[in-house]
Image: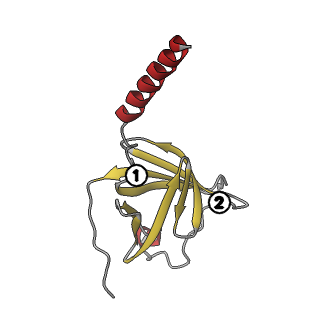
């Protein structure tokens, strides 16, 4: 009986020491991420050309998207000249940005790949880590 109590006490002590030694999981999302590309899975050979050939093709590109994940669960979002703030939350591979749900496909020190959930044709977003900074406009 004493041997069983001693063994279980020793196991409990080891488990307690092991649990105390665990570090809080690092939030790899914290920081600035710039959109590299997005893919909705549709392959198209059709290129739509502007009617007015003098239009600048560069101006027709989609606005850049930059995400800044803050430690207080606030996301600063910039798309072209517009910027806004929203809440974000993460649970394992599930990521909620404002009211839109994503699944994290890959997250490491320099790349973030997420796919939009609940879409007929889900879009995959490819981000890279950036040193860039931006401010949310006060307008």
For label 2, count other residues whose C-alpha is less than 10 Å away and answer few (under 14), some (14-19) or many (20+): few
Question: Can you say which quadrant of the picture contains the C terminus?
Answer: bottom left
Q: Nearer the viewer, residue 75 or 78?
A: 75
Question: Can you say which quadrant of the picture contains the N terminus?
Answer: top right
Q: Which residue is mark 1?
A: 29
Identify which residue is drawn at 39% across, 73% down.
80
Q: How many marks?
A: 2
Q: Residue furthest bottom?
A: 139
For label 1, count other residues whose C-alpha is less than 10 Å away and answer few (under 14), some (14-19) or many (20+): some
Residue 13, label in figure: none
Mark in the foreground, 1 or 2: 1
Q: Quadrant of residue 30?
A: bottom left
Q: Is residue 119 left or right of residue 139?
A: right
Q: Residue furthest top?
A: 3
Residue 43 lies, with reference to residue 19, above or below; the image says: below
Residue 120 lies, with reference to residue 49, above or below; the image says: above
Instruction: Residue 26 in the image: state x and y as whole percent.
Output: 37, 44
Q: Nearer the viewer, residue 14 or 97?
A: 14
Q: Which is more N-terminal, label 2 or label 1?
A: 1
Residue 114 lies, with reference to residue 65, above or below; the image says: above
Label 1 residue SS: loop
Say if residue 48 shows up in the picture: yes
Instruction: Residue 96 in the image: state x and y as whole percent.
Output: 54, 61
Q: Which residue is mark 2?
A: 46
């Amino acid at each position: 009986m004493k041997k069983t109590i001693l063994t279980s006490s020793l196991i409990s002590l080891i488990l307690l020491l092991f649990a105390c030694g665990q570090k809080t999981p690092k939030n790899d999302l914290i920081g600035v991420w710039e959109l590299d590309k997005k893919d909705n899975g549709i392959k198209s050979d059709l290129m739509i050309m502007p009617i007015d050939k003098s239009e600048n093709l560069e101006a027709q590109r989609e606005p850049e998207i930059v995400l800044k994940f803050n430690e207080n669960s606030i996301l600063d979002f910039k798309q072209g000249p517009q910027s806004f703030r929203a809440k974000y939350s993460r649970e394992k591979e599930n990521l909620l940005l404002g009211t839109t749900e994503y699944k994290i496909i890959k997250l490491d020190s320099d790349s973030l790949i997420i796919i939009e959930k609940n879409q007929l044709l889900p879009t995959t977003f490819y981000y890279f880590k950036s040193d860039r900074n931006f401010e949310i406009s006060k307008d």
